[in-house]
Image (spheres, rainbow, N blue to C red):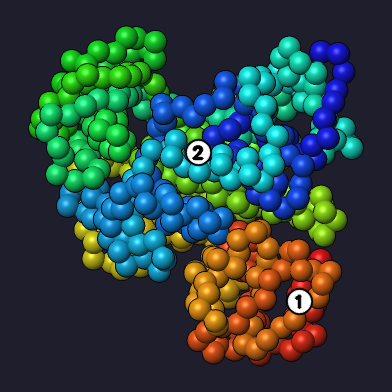
Amino acid sequence: MHGTSGTARVIVVGSGPTGLLLAGDLATAGVPVTLLEKRPHGISNLSRAFALHARALEQLDARGLADELEAVGRPLTRLDLFDGLTLDLGTLPSRFGHVLVLPQYEVEKALERRAVAAGVDFRHESEVTGLTQDADGVTVHIKGAEGLRAAYVVGADGMRSAVREAVGMPFPGRSAIRSVVLADVLLAERPETVLTAGAVGDAFAFLAPFGDGYHRVICWHRGRDVPDHEPVDLDEIKEITRLALGRDYGMHDPRWMSRFHSDERQVPRYRVGRVFLAGDAAHVHTPAGGQGMNTGLQDAANLSWKLAAVLHGHAAPGLLDTYQSERHPVGRTVLRSSGAIVRLAMAKGWQLPVRAALATALSRLGPVRRRAIGQVTGIGYRYPAPRGAHPLTGARVPDLALAGGGRLYEALRGGRFVLVTPGPYDVAPARADRLAAARWRSGRRTALLVRPDGYAAWAAEHAGQADIERALAAHVG
């Protein structure tokens, strides 16, 4: 390396869904951003994620992307788990009362188009080898190239994050499932459901469509614990699938097969000075519940507007500390819930009555079921609020109907706060780049300030002009 260059205010490392959404948000907000990716250009279809849950779809709706993804994915309104337990998603208090089944690469394509249009500086084949930071910024070292300098760096570079390693952040946890087998196959028999999953004895299998005729199969056998580099053949996949699902659906012509292990890990801190970790670089867990990509997208949505506000001088740097206090507990809960799902699915012996009792409780007890659905879909999370704050503060705000026929998540497009009031409010020109005003269609008397990520920053009943101005000064700047 022969020095440093670059004019980026933020460097994002990793062009998966988390990094793409974050970089696109920053560029849309007028923040110069460079995205580094060690792979050559081109979206890989070897993705493990196959589901967009309601909260992630809401975040994509706020970026004008949800409808195009809905057009290529397949909605599933219920999740069948174990012992006859079904989670009905059709009653979700969301525009998206379903899980959308589609490969991760479709999400990446949409997010990449948005990031390119917003002006993100993409640099592929740029492998990060280390970084150094000081009080003024961060220098990222790149293999075979000059280093790049930025005010902040976000590592969204996956489970084997070079950024996480560079800042010396541990990744405590353990391997939850070893020797998981993945393959893309053609099927001679069409499955009866969009997602097919089952577990019998020591075997588990899952099938999901790619949309191009191929299906991704994920399977595991408790008794076959071999290293990740052990070769995989189609006969092994078919055998495990038959044990778990009763048949192999006539699998043939695999275009890709691999073996991996599923870890449960989380970094203690999502921020180290001017460096942040997001997505799989910060937390990994079992694929049960399909929460991985969704959690990373929400990490990005939480962090992007805060970085933009600080870099534009509209918020104090302390705002960035709330990324840790808001997202780390969510990541911890996802680890626990996804781990619980897979352990219950693979229960045996004395564990089976416990699983059956839990399934009964979830089926019969509304509050327990709603909490489980809220965690899996992401709509049940809320962020900490100051003592004495209005009950809405910190809560996810649904897609409100606004006066004039609009929707809240349309008003959120562009990364601005949205102030929802009973009557008209004129936004001062100095705030027009970061604040939009709307009125309740319902006639409600609450004043509500919605953050760019769709959570309530502040709310008050029968608020006066002075109350609103103080709230805007505190949160919007």
- Which residue sits at x=37%, y=51%? 71
Q: Name the residue under label 2.
A: 108
- Which residue sits at x=76%, y=47%? 31
Amino acid marked by disc 1: Val
Count of numbered badges drawn on the protein:
2
Quarter the C terminus occupies: bottom right
At which x and y percent is residue 369? 32, 62
Above or below 305: residue 207: above
Viewed as shown, does residue 146 lie left or right of 438? right
Above or below 192: residue 424: below
- Which residue sits at x=53%, y=74%? 406
Amino acid marked by disc 2: Glu
Marked residue nearer the N-terminal end (2 or 1): 2
Is residue 186 visible in the rendered structure shown here?
yes
* Image quadrant where residue 136 sits: top right
Q: Is mark 1 on a helix, strand or loop?
A: loop
Count residues near mark 2 (Cα–Cα under 10 Å), then give few for <14, some for 14-19, many for 20+. many
Viewed as shown, does residue 425 lie left or right of 1? left
* Image quadrant where residue 158 sits: top right
At which x and y percent is residue 407? 52, 72
Is residue 296 visible in the rendered structure shown here?
no
Q: Is mark 2 on a helix, strand or loop?
A: helix
At which x and y percent is residue 281? 58, 33
Viewed as shown, does residue 399 lie left or right of 23? left
Above or below 295: residue 6: above
Viewed as shown, does residue 357 lie left or right of 39? left
- Which residue sits at x=68%, y=51%? 28
Quarter the N terminus occupies: top right
Q: How far apart are marks 2 and 1 (CA)?
A: 35 Å
Count residues near mark 1 (Cα–Cα under 10 Å), then give few for <14, some for 14-19, many for 20+. some
Q: Mark 1 points at which residue?
A: 427
